[in-house]
């Protein structure tokens, strides 16, 4: 009987490399950690310079928290509340006390404050009105109106205080669409003082008409509400890039706020502090917009119809008369008073400009020397 033998296939023993892999991974992690620490060390402590593949690269490394928090800390103390108390005549002849509130920005450490003209308009038009400025630390001061400019919707106040924190003003000409924009002010009044809203620069040089004045403004989607007027629109550095002035209020839209560019504001504010008024070039007419339909109906041309020429003015000296229609100002066509004013305000007092006008079926041109009229105090008079 044959014996049955069990046959086994013997497999040579294979050495397990698992432990080696683990050691390799651990060593790699340690090396990576060391390299990362060295990189961080060099970035932070060695002039923020790092050598990568033979290229000397410089990094600006900052330990920053939420940038909006930093912006609010920098710019917040320079934003103030502005309140105007005045009297209105009631239905039965009695005087009723009322008030209006807005915001402002500290312009200098010795008490000059910027705000919107429309915030203090009631005080400008009423000798009995009182203006109060409330600082970020809740201190209150009576304020004097130093000057105002209706065209740009700006006004300057003065309080008897020193050691204030003035805002830093940025260069609005360097703004780009998409930049961070932070609005700081008092929406709905002092109860919500110092409110911060965040958005972006939505557009630049928006032509916006409010209360008969047209301005080129910064558009932002940072929330701007009644009471924010006169407050600050600030960039990521905490610099004021605009003075919040208006928003479109409609149930179908949101996020359409507007601010006066800082460069425009600083120029006006400087002149108001120095002279108390804005003196602009003056033509000396009272004009009426003559649209194409009305012009065609009366067999005239579209332009600015001169309804009155004031005596001893540039228009009078140049021989313009009632009934003339201005169609060009210094080579640029005009069809409205606003267009004429906008072009005129780009000129300086003493400049000579060429006026093209229509009279009795013919076109004429005349040179006109612009003078200044301080009595308008920045109004939209031609």
Image (cartoon, helix red, strand yellow):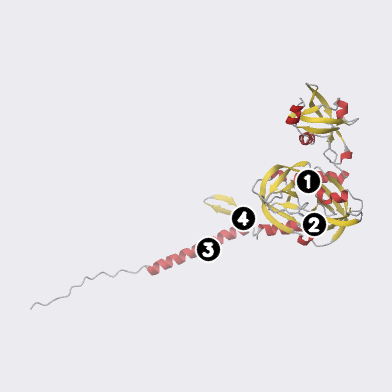
Q: Of 188 and 57, which appears nearest the observer? A: 188
- Of callouts 2 and 1, the N-terminal one: 2
Residue at the spot 59% in from the left edge and 58% down from the top edge: 42
Residue at the spot 68% in from the left edge and 57% down from the top edge: 68
| Residue 270 visible, this orientation | yes
Q: Of 365 and 270, which appears nearest the observer? A: 365
Q: CA distance from mark 1 to mark 3?
A: 53 Å
Which residue matches tag 3?
A: 34
Q: Is residue 153 left or right of residue 249?
A: right
Is the C-beta separation of discs 3 and 2 under 8 Å? no
- Of callouts 2 and 4, the N-terminal one: 4
Quarter of the figure with residue 190:
bottom right
Q: Which mark is residue 48?
A: 4
- Of callouts 4 and 1, the N-terminal one: 4
- Of callouts 4 and 3, the N-terminal one: 3
Q: Secondary structure at mark 1?
A: helix
Quarter holding the N terminus is bottom left
Q: CA distance from mark 2 to mark 1?
A: 17 Å
| Label 2 packing within 10 angstroms: few (<14), some (14-19), many (20+) | many
């Amino acid at each position: 009987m044959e014996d049955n033998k069990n046959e086994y296939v013997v497999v040579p023993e294979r050495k397990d490399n698992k432990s080696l892999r683990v050691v390799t991974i651990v060593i790699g992690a340690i090396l990576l950690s060391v390299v990362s620490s060295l990189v961080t060390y060099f970035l932070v402590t060695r002039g923020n310079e790092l050598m990568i593949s033979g290229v000397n690269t410089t990094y600006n490394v900052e330990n920053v928290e939420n940038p909006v928090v930093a912006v609010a800390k920098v710019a917040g103390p320079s934003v103030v509340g502005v309140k105007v108390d005045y009297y209105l005549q009631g239905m039965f002849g009695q005087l009723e006390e009322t008030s209006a509130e807005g915001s402002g920005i500290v312009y200098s450490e010795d008490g000059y404050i910027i705000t919107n003209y429309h915030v203090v308009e009631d005080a400008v038009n009423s000798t009995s009105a009182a203006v109060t400025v409330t600082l970020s630390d809740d201190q209150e001061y009576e304020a004097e109106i130093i000057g105002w400019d209706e065209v740009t919707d700006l006004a300057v106040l003065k309080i008897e205080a020193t050691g204030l924190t003035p805002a830093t003003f940025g260069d609005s000409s360097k703004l780009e669409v998409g930049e961070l924009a932070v609005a700081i002010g008092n929406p709905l009044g002092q109860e919500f003082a110092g409110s911060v809203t965040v958005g972006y620069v939505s557009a630049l040089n928006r032509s916006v008409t409010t209360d008969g004045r047209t301005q080129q403004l910064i558009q932002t989607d940072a929330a701007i509400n009644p009471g924010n007027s006169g407050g600050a629109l600030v960039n990521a550095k905490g610099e004021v890039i605009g003075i919040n002035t208006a928003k479109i209020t409609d149930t179908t839209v949101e996020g359409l706020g507007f601010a006066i560019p800082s460069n425009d504001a600083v120029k006006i504010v400087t002149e108001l502090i120095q002279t108390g008024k804005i003196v602009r070039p003056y033509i000396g007419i009272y004009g009426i917009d003559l649209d194409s339909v009305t012009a065609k109906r009366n067999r005239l041309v579209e332009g600015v119809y001169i309804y009155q020429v004031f005596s001893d003015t540039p228009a009078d000296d140049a021989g313009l008369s009632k009934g003339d229609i201005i169609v060009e100002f210094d080579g640029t066509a005009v069809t409205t008073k606003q267009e004429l004013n906008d072009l005129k305000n780009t000129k300086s007092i003493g400049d000579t400009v060429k006026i093209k006008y229509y009279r009795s079926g013919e076109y004429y041109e005349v040179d006109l020397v612009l003078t200044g009229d301080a009595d308008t105090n920045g109004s939209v008079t031609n």
